[in-house]
Amino acid sequence: MATDLDHTARLSSRREGEAARFTLGGEWVLADSAALEKDVAGMAAAARGAARAIVDLAQIVRLDTAGAWIIGRAMDELAHAGIAVSLEGARPEHVILLQETKFRPFEAPSRCRRLLVVDILADLGRSVVSAAQDAYSGVGFLGEFVVASGVSLLAAGRFRFTSLVYHMESFGFRSLPIIALINLLVGAIVAQQGIFQLRRFGAGAYAVDLIGILVLRELGVLLTSIMIAGRSGSAITAELGSMKMREEVDALRVMGLSPVEVLVTPRVLALVLSLPLLTFIADMSALFGGLLVCWVYEGISPAAYLSLLQAAIGRNTFIVGLIKAPFMALVIGMVAAMEGMATRGSAESLGRHVTASVVKAIFMVIVLDGFFAIFFASIKY
């Protein structure tokens, strides 16, 4: 038996002539919504044959949005069964809530069945359009960066030298241990595999040529750029994106300052200056790893290794990798800054742009390396 202290949701029905009366009581709230949905499902059957239905809400103690939506849906089902529905005993606040949460049927959108080939081509088309839009935006952003950098460098008082040094320390100095270690290991692995393969032809000593050319022309700068894209590029995007979310970028504009000049220029220039230095360290680490492996596996002494290395590589081989580094740094910085500035006001947007920044930067670095390889091969350098 229900008492004044019993707030359990309940539903009872009885016939009054041609009318079916439904009495609702207790708390109709979200916590009991599963049980309430089962209770109201039988209202249409209980009112079958009645000309009208009366829904009495006088005993409802508490009603929230979920409860009001369930009641509204039950009244809608009764109306669709041809039964006139009326409310009784509802408090004014409950009437307002029922009106605001009025049940409306939702039609599931029909699935458009298309051929798989059409879907694949549509996705490909969207990807091409998106890439073209990114390229167009990138050119515009690069122009804005060049103008802001030129203004900063020409007006010495406006250039943020402290910020530049801070970011060089963050992007360059703190990346040094991991880049040196990874390239040391990669150089050792390349040397080991080269020795194992070339030894079958009695040409194990040529592993030194392989290490020197491969590391200095390609691997050193490529591995360093990929690691910087993952470490520093993502950090730039996250920093700028967080500032965008906190409206600090808008605040700079309100103060008459250019966000590109204040935020982007020091970071990108720090990358451009740091990456050649990191590439040099990476080259030396990889060559040292190769030296150790050649000494252990092939018995080539350090002096012989350096002599063979000097004979195998020319100055152009050493310079090619260093020439690529600033261009790759510029690409990484541009992509990271663009993605950071494109962040909208949510953590989900920030995470999506950080991921896009790393993926796009690595992709662009590899593409740029391919263009450089074709260019240097065409001029025979």
Image (cartoon, rainbow, N blue to C red):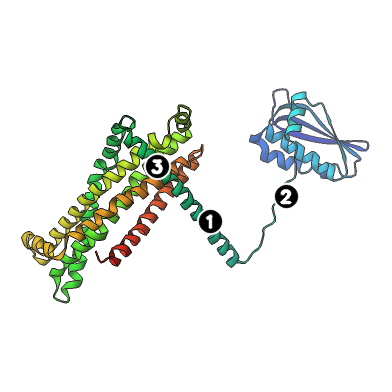
Type of residue at label 1?
Val
- Residue topped by disc 2: 107
Q: Nearer the viewer, mark 1 or mark 3?
A: 3
Pointer 3 local density, CA inside 10 Å: few below 14, some 14–19, many at least 20: some
Please tell me in which quadrant of the rendered image residue 217 appears: bottom left
Type of amino acid under label 3? Phe
- Whether residue 355 is situated above or below residue 289 in the rendered picture: above
Sequence-wise, which precedes: disc 2 or disc 3?
Answer: 2
The amino acid pointed to by label 2 is Glu
* Residue designated by label 3: 145
Residue 172 x, y percent position in the rendering:
26, 43
Tell me the SS state at disc 1: helix
Which quadrant holds the N terminus? Answer: top right
Residue at the image position 55 percent from the left and 64 percent from the top: 120
Left or right: 341 in relation to 88:
left
Secondary structure, mark 2, is loop
The residue indicated by pointer 1 is 129
Instruction: State the image quarter where residue 3 is shown.
Output: top right
The mark nearer the N terminus, 1 or 2, is 2
Image spot of residue 151 (x, y percent) = 36, 36
When the figure is inspected, residue 290 is found, relative to residue 197, above or below; the finding is above
| Front residue of 78 and 204 | 204
Which of disc 3 and disc 1 is earlier in sequence?
1
Whole-angstrom CA distance, mark 1 to mark 3, is 24 Å
